[in-house]
């Protein structure tokens, strides 16, 4: 037990050093700036209003589209449900800035659809940000809503049907009370995701500036770290509210020990409508990916559309290979060390009760409430001048902390479901805790560990927020080349970078799928 306490102390100190102290450094930096002047400025107020309006509209549309998509995938009897479920998550495999760029390529002044139909090219601004944000946030909303629907108990509905209660009354008496709290969590999660993103508005917002873009401009372009800290503290607010709501209103689960899934009922007309809806959604999702593939292998858009590898060669010559190597290296170390750290913390919090475990649990999920831009600025202020600054190590550490909460919760839930008496039985038999962990718990949660590693890798490959303040020409990840190429009007190169990131993430996802399938077989 003494060794366990020492490990928990070390983990607590590590989390404080890598999360709490940097956040404190950013908040303390506000004292050196004229916060009142910044908050009262017209530029700040306009950016705040723009962010709230765009994020609110995008959240409403994302959840509406995702709700019907989730209903079709989970509840309908249409064909290819699993294929649609996979395709619906494809936008999660490319950076948010790529979604903004895809809309420029499709609907911009020289966009493919704009030129083909002779449109005016008015995608920039509010509706451009909303459209790109819906593409970016839709998969997250879909996964959360599908999970809610998949684990809804069908027993109350069967009883209500037997009693002759109409469907409309069933919805307001059974479905709505069940969905209320989880749906509020989804709304908070999607709103926070869109509100704190700067990739889409940076690419397609034009003069419609949002808070994350304003923060990016103040820090990257003007080196005003004080102003950036003030804006960053405002970006924390919705994420903090969402975090506190989720922490204190978490559902305790179903009252029964066994959840009876709702049977899929074949309804030919409804199933055809669901298939058509999902097909349209997947076509819209696939359009950006198709545009990137086409643009990467033509000579020059829109003047010469002939097949060519000149843009691929030019992109590689401009350092894409080197920066892709950086991204692969960063993502590999993040997936290995992030998975190990998250799993070990989850082991102690899920299977060793005590105040120290509660503290570790709270700090581990706190990263949910810290947007990537805020974390990146915090690291830039805290580690500036240290041996970690401008190294791959600080990018690895930032990504681990940025993405740790979700893999940690995956491990926490998996370990919490295993028999709580395993360690005590092992000690009675003279088996040390280490061997119980190595020979029993780790193999039992092997699939979860794979999913954790894949989550870390995929998100580290495509992130642009946490690393934008920390990278240099020497250690820059490949995702940041999208912004650089777009500024140079080299859209073909930016499209090829998006394809590279998508290809790497698809390979990792396929590898995890094959390993899981082989284990189950």
Image (cartoon, rainbow, N blue to C red):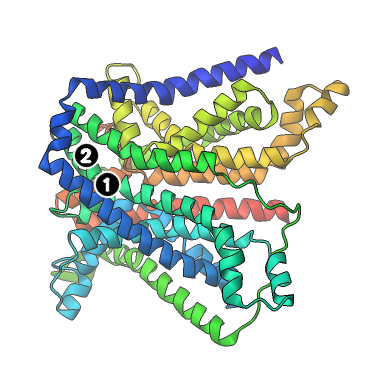
Along the viewing direction, whichever of 31 and 426 lies nearer the viewer: 31
Q: Are marks 1 and 2 in contact (CB under 8 Å)?
A: yes
Quadrant (top left/top right/bottom left/bottom right) for the C terminus:
bottom right
In the image: residue 439, left or right of residue 345:
right
Q: Is residue 153 left or right of residue 85?
A: right
Residue 20 percent location from the top left of the image: 41, 24
153 left or right, relative to 251: right
Q: Which residue is drawn at 48% across and 66% down?
A: 67
Give above or below for 86 relative to 399: below
Badge 1 marks a residue whose secondary structure is: loop
Residue 179, located in which quarter of the rendered image?
Answer: bottom right
Question: Which residue is outermost to the right?
Answer: 429
Residue matched to label 2? 216
Reply above or below: 209 against 367: below
Q: Residue 198 carries which label?
A: 1
- Quadrant containing the N terminus is top right
Q: Which residue is drawn at 53% across and 52% down?
A: 181
The percent position of residue 262, horizontal first and vertical second, equals 67, 68
The residue furthest bottom is 269
Q: In this view, does 295 lie to the left or right of 122?
A: right
Residue 227 in view in this figure: yes
As rendered, which of 54 and 503 lies closer to the eye? 54
Name the residue rendered at 56%, 81% in the picture.
271
User: Marks 1 and 2, Cα distance to the nearest angstrom?
Assistant: 8 Å
Tell me which corner region of the image, top left, top right, bottom left or bottom right, holds residue 260: bottom right
- Let me know if residue 468 appears in the view: no
């Amino acid at each position: 037990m003494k060794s366990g306490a020492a490990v928990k102390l070390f983990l607590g100190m590590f989390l404080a050093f890598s999360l709490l102290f940097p956040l404190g450094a950013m908040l303390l930096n506000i004292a050196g700036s004229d916060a009142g002047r910044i908050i009262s400025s017209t530029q700040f107020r306009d950016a705040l209003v723009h962010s709230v309006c765009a994020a609110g509209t995008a959240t409403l549309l994302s959840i509406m589209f995702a709700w019907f998509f989730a209903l079709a995938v989970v509840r309908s009897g249409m064909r290819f449900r699993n294929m649609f479920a996979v395709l619906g998550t494809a936008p999660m495999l490319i950076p948010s800035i790529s979604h903004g760029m895809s809309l420029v390529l499709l609907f911009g002044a020289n966009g493919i659809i704009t030129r083909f139909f002779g449109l005016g090219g008015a995608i920039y601004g509010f509706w451009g940000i909303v459209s790109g944000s819906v593409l970016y946030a839709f998969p997250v909303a879909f996964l959360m809503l599908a999970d809610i629907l998949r684990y809804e108990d069908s027993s109350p509905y069967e009883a209500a049907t037997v009693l002759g209660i109409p469907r409309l009354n069933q919805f307001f008496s059974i479905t709505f009370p069940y969905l209320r709290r989880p749906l509020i969590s989804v709304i908070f999660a999607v709103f926070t995701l869109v509100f704190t993103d700067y990739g889409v508005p940076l690419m397609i917002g034009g003069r419609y500036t949002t808070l994350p873009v304003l923060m990016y401009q103040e820090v990257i372009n003007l080196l005003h770290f004080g102003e950036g800290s003030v804006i960053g503290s405002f970006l924390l607010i919705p994420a903090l509210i969402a975090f506190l709501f989720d922490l204190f209103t978490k559902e305790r689960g179903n009252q029964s020990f066994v959840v009876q899934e709702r049977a899929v009922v074949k309804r030919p007309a409804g199933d055809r409508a669901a298939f058509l809806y999902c097909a349209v959604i997947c076509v819209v999702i696939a359009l950006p990916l198709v545009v990137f593939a086409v643009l990467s292998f033509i000579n020059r858009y829109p003047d010469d559309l002939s097949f060519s590898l000149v843009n691929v060669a030019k992109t590689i010559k401009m350092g894409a290979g080197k920066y892709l190597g950086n991204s692969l290296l960063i993502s590999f170390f993040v997936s290995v060390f992030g998975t190990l750290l998250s799993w070990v913390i989850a082991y102690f919090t899920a299977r060793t009760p005590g105040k120290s475990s509660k503290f570790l649990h709270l700090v581990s999920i706190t990263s949910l409430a810290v947007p990537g831009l805020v974390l990146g600025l915090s690291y830039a202020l805290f580690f500036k001048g240290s041996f970690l600054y401008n190294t791959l190590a600080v990018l690895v550490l930032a990504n681990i902390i940025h993405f740790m909460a979700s893999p940690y919760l995956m491990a926490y839930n998996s370990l919490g479901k295993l028999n709580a008496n395993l360690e005590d039985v092992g000690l009675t038999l003279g088996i040390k805790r280490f061997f119980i962990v190595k020979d029993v718990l780790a193999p039992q949660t092997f699939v979860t560990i794979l999913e954790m590693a894949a989550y870390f890798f995929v998100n580290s490959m495509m992130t642009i927020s946490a690393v934008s303040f920390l990278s240099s020409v020497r250690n820059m990840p490949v995702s940041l080349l999208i912004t650089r190429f777009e500024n140079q009007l080299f859209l073909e190169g930016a499209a090829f970078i998006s394809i590279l990131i998508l290809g790497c993430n698809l390979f990792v996802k396929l590898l995890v799928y094959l390993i899981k399938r082989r284990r189950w077989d």
